[in-house]
């Protein structure tokens, strides 16, 4: 295969629920070689696993289907290749659903690749038996302690399996739990012929992936420094990585779109979800974020260069989720005068009533919206307020106790301080708490599976 000198990789979704028109804008408003879309978060996997258990044809991000229907003409006519982890825990079913859309659109010969093997939910017992304890990275506890409450378990695969699907001719690649950064790195590996030994180049691709992974957050959205002067956010242009064979990347966006790409917007995104900046660990490489250099290269164009990396570890990260009790959240609004004092009194009354009834909770949180809900004790003290929203949340293992909280909150309307208003949500009901279990698993314990299918 003849290697390209540069490619344009466009971010289309930063999470499941992101701006639905963004993928269409990315493929229709300018040159795009690859469109990458991130749909998965840690808790999402347990939701998808439940959907699949109820219906074997589900378990993927269903929001992906109307997006594919909209952009499929560009995939076919302009050879835009799509990479997404929207396959969830059932990428094969997602592939079949996309084939159905293609048939209805009159498309023939579409090639879709799936990368799977990351879902180890059904293999957990075998892994534990073979000595893989899947210890919690924060507490050191073995997964056996929550095995009976486990809801999902997935390994984070990286970019190389996706690159293999591209090599086999896939126009669309659907993955399960792949790293967010791997979606962007994969086309660079494929187009530039990078190998596992190209450590610094891989690190550069990882940094580009980190910049793109949250969609518009690096092109002016959620921009703290100077948000008032970001132009035309209603038509924000999602970021594009113009990647070069030597590892240099230019972050930009389509001309004529809103938003802003600058050194400052990129810096804010680079700080997102960062622990030790010298050790950004992925399956392919450990990227050193302290080595990154940024330089303005024209309007809405930033050069990212000189990124350094180190060889990867011998482990995959595992994202597991388990049931950890129940929670409920309720609100009451208290009006002027003495709004805060009334809300505080109501909280005290409710806590006493629950205590008198013998109910106990693992956590009991109270916030006063409009007063301290965002910044807690750092909030400025105000002498008088027109209204305060009392928001109370409880969490515990006893579902009945959590349910009782709801039964005690509502009566405060007529049995507590005066001027409750704006109460229309009804009695808060218990909801299941899904807790996160991060672990490591030796890369030798499993292999990703790559499967490319041409639609008949």
Image (tube, rainbow, N blue to C red):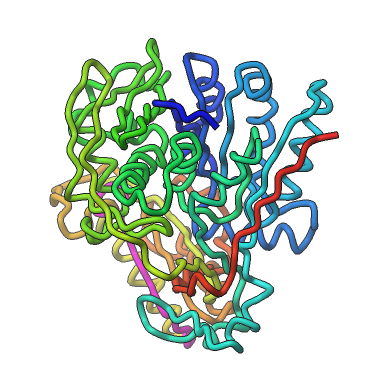
Q: Can you give x and y, in whole percent of width and height, for residue 98 in the image?
A: 74, 36
The residue at 49%/22% (across/down) is 32
Which residue occupies the foreground of this view, 358 or 258?
A: 258
User: Image height check: is 179 above or below 135?
Assistant: above
Pinpoint residue 185: horizontal percent, then vertical percent: 43, 43
Q: Which region of the structure is painted magenta?
A: 357-373
Task: Say which of 255 and 422 sits in front.
Answer: 255
Q: Is residue 361 magenta?
A: yes
Viewer-side residue, 442 vs 280: 442
| Residue at position x 18%, y 47% in the image | 291
Residue 161 left/right relative to 383:
right
Q: In the shown orientation, is residue 398 left or right of residue 219? A: right
Q: Residue furthest front?
A: 1
Q: Is residue 49 visible to the viewer in this orientation of the structure?
A: yes
Report x, y in % for residue 202.
36, 47
Q: Is residue 18 visible?
A: no
Q: Judge from the rendering whether residue 317 lies leftward or rightward of residue 293; answer left or right.
A: right
Image quadrant holding the C terminus, namely top right
Q: Quadrant of the N terminus?
A: top right
Quadrant hosting residue 226: top left
216 inside magenta stretch = no
């Amino acid at each position: 295969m003849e290697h390209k000198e540069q490619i344009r990789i466009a971010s289309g979704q930063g999470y499941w629920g992101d701006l639905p028109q963004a993928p269409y804008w990315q493929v229709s408003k300018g040159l795009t070689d690859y469109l990458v879309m991130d749909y998965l978060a840690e808790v999402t996997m347990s939701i998808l696993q439940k959907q699949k258990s109820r219906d074997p044809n589900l378990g993927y991000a269903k929001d992906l289907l109307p997006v594919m229907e909209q952009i499929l003409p560009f995939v076919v006519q302009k050879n835009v290749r799509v990479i997404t982890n929207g396959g969830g825990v059932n990428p094969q079913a997602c592939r079949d659903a996309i084939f159905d859309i293609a048939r209805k659109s009159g498309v023939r010969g579409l090639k879709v690749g799936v990368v799977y093997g990351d879902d180890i939910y059904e293999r957990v017992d075998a892994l534990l038996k073979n000595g893989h304890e899947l210890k919690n990275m924060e507490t050191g506890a073995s997964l056996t302690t929550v095995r009976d409450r486990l809801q999902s378990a997935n390994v984070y695969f990286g970019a190389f399996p996706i690159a293999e699907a591209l090599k086999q001719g896939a126009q669309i690649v659907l993955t399960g739990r792949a790293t967010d950064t791997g979606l962007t790195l994969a086309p660079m590996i494929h187009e530039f012929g990078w190998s596992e030994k190209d450590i610094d180049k891989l690190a550069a691709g990882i940094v580009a992936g980190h910049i793109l992974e949250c969609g518009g957050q690096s092109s002016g959205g959620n921009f703290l420094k100077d948000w008032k002067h970001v132009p035309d956010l209603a038509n924000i242009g999602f970021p594009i990585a113009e990647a070069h064979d030597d590892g240099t990347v230019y972050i930009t966006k389509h001309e004529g779109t809103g938003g802003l790409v600058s050194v400052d917007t990129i810096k804010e995104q680079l700080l997102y979800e960062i622990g030790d900046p010298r050790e950004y660990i992925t399956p392919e490489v450990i990227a050193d974020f302290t080595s990154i250099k940024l330089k303005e290269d024209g309007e809405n164009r930033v050069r990212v260069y000189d990124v350094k990396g180190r060889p990867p570890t011998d482990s995959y990260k595992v994202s597991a989720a388990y049931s950890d009790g129940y929670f409920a959240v309720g609100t009451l609004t208290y009006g002027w005068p003495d709004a805060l004092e009334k809300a505080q009194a109501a909280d005290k009354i409710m806590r006493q009533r629950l205590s008198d009834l013998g109910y106990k909770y693992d956590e009991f949180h109270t916030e006063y919206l409009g007063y301290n809900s965002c910044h807690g004790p750092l909030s400025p003290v105000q002498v008088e307020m027109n209204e305060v929203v009392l928001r109370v949340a409880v969490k515990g293992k006893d579902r009945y106790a959590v349910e009782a909280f709801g039964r005690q909150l509502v009566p405060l309307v007529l049995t507590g301080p005066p001027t409750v208003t704006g109460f229309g949500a009804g009695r808060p009901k218990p909801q299941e708490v899904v807790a996160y279990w991060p672990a490591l698993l030796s890369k030798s314990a499993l292999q990703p599976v790559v499967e490319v299918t041409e639609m008949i």
